[in-house]
Amino acid sequence: MKDAMSKVLAQIDREELISLVADLVRINSVWDPEAGSNEQPAAELVAAWAQEKGFAFQMEEAAPGRPNVIITWQGGPGERTLMFEGHTDVVTPGDPAAWTVDPFGAEIKDGRMYGRGSCDTKGNLAAMLIAMAALKDSGVRLQGAIVGGVLCDEEDQMQGVRHFIDQGHADQVTGAVICEPQDGLICTSQKGAIRVEFFISGRMSHGAMPLSGLNTAPAVSELIRGLQRLEEQACERFGRDAYLGWPSFTPTVIQAPASGPRQLNVMPGEARLLVDVRTVSGQNHQEIIAGLQDMACQAEAGCLEHYTRSDVRLEIERDRDLGITTSILTDRPCTFTPEDHPLVLASDQASREITGKDPEHAGVPGATDGTFLWALKDIPIVTMGAGDRHVPHQKDEWVDLDQLLETARIYALTGLHYLS
Ligand SMILES: [Zn+2]
């Protein structure tokens, strides 16, 4: 094994890695149809690289102008197929003037490369490609295959990974390394997410004559109190997850009126409340959704009761047609790969060998493409990679090049161990 390890590691060249990252960072792959930028040129660069390296690959459009690149290599006969996953899209740099460097310049300063995507996740994408090539070119015979999923649209609707799954590419995959900035931590779990919209309909009126309408604001307040109760109950029942922290029910957007201009002397007839629920291991999403719907019914009943009481007191009779509808916008489960799964053990061993330190396990606070591989195909996933976890989506995004090289080496040995 020592011999195989050194053969694989000998294939990894720091300069080659850095130049591949730089080439990727210099491409603006923000999905922005108005500005005309998308993932296509980044995907083409990866495809050209795969061709040059002698890999079999396919390019498939998950959506117009948004291709996936699927790179495959059969390392030898065996049951296992290891997937490396990395996305080509990046989030907008925002105002380039807020940056002290060119967001698409790939400038290197003090051992760091700067630029949008350097950390999330073009650095790790390059590291996984270099690791795959090292495994292939080392001449070491593996027991199984490697698939590189270079996917589009991770930052938004995750159409890339869905398309990858729909096309059957995930069918043979027995484990996946999700290449995202986790600062060297080996993440075996990630939070689940339920995103909810509550739509409250009442009746619009003049602010001077509120009794001629039906205000939606008390319902919003009932809903927020209900969310606080649900959050308290979840925290009490499930406690603090060692890797993922506390479950949360966070109202994020409150809109009244639900659309159109606001005016101080107009009581809006419709309101909208958006809620971002994040879950930890053990929580059942069906149960949570039922709890949210139940809570909305109670909020509605509570408001109607209030209006009935005030109508009696004021000796009026209003049309009390207040209603709350609940829509589930997103439902992504919490993922969890057992600590003794062969993929986790392979990652642990690789990390220990390369860093000389005991691996540290953690959880991913947000969802990744791995969520869908886990949820739709039952694929065990490990999320790991170079880069400070707080740097993604900020200005002056950067990645440490020593850590990136280390990551490429860890990916390669993870592949070697998992497929040996
Ligand atoms: Zn990412």
Image (cartoon, rainbow, N blue to C red):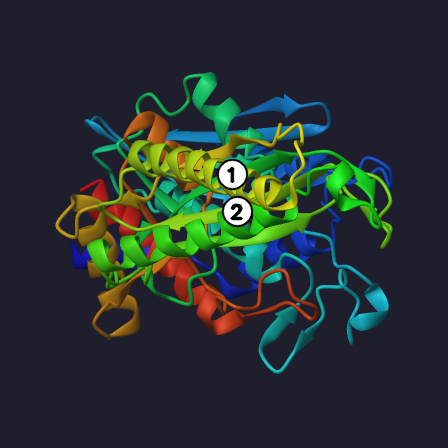
Above or below — where is 113 with respect to 45?
Answer: below
Direction from residue 95 to residue 56 in the image, left or right = left
Q: Residues within 10 Å of mark 1 (few under 14, many from 20)?
A: many
Name the residue nearer the viewer: 242 or 128. 242
Q: Is residue 76 above or below residue 181?
A: above
Q: Residue at x 24, y 64 (%)?
A: 242
Q: Amino acid at mark 2?
A: Val
- View extreme (bottom): residue: 110
Q: Residues within 10 Å of mark 2 (few under 14, many from 20)?
A: many
- Residue 5: image quadrant is bottom left
The N terminus appears in which quarter of the rendering? Answer: bottom left
> Which one is nearer the viewer's eye here, 307 or 10?
307
For the question of whether residue 238 can be seen, the reply is yes
Q: Position of residue 372 (x, y in %)?
A: 41, 33
Task: Provide residue 388's location: percent of width, then percent of height.
Answer: 49, 70
Q: Circle 2 is placed at which residue position? A: 275
Amino acid found under the numbered disc labelled 1: Val
Q: Residue at x 85, y 55 (%)?
A: 264
Residue 54: horizontal and vertical position, in percent?
Answer: 50, 33
Helix, strand or loop at label 1? It is strand
Q: Calculate the distance from the C-alpha at mark 1 to the C-alpha at mark 2.
A: 5 Å
- Indicate which disc, 1 or 2, sits on the residue closer to the N terminus: 1
Q: In the picture shown, does residue 191 fall above or below 166?
A: below
Disc 1: which residue:
196
Q: Are marks 1 and 2 in contact (CB under 8 Å)?
A: yes
Q: Residue at the spot x=73%, y=33% of the render?
A: 203
* Residue depicted at x 81% and y 35%: 33
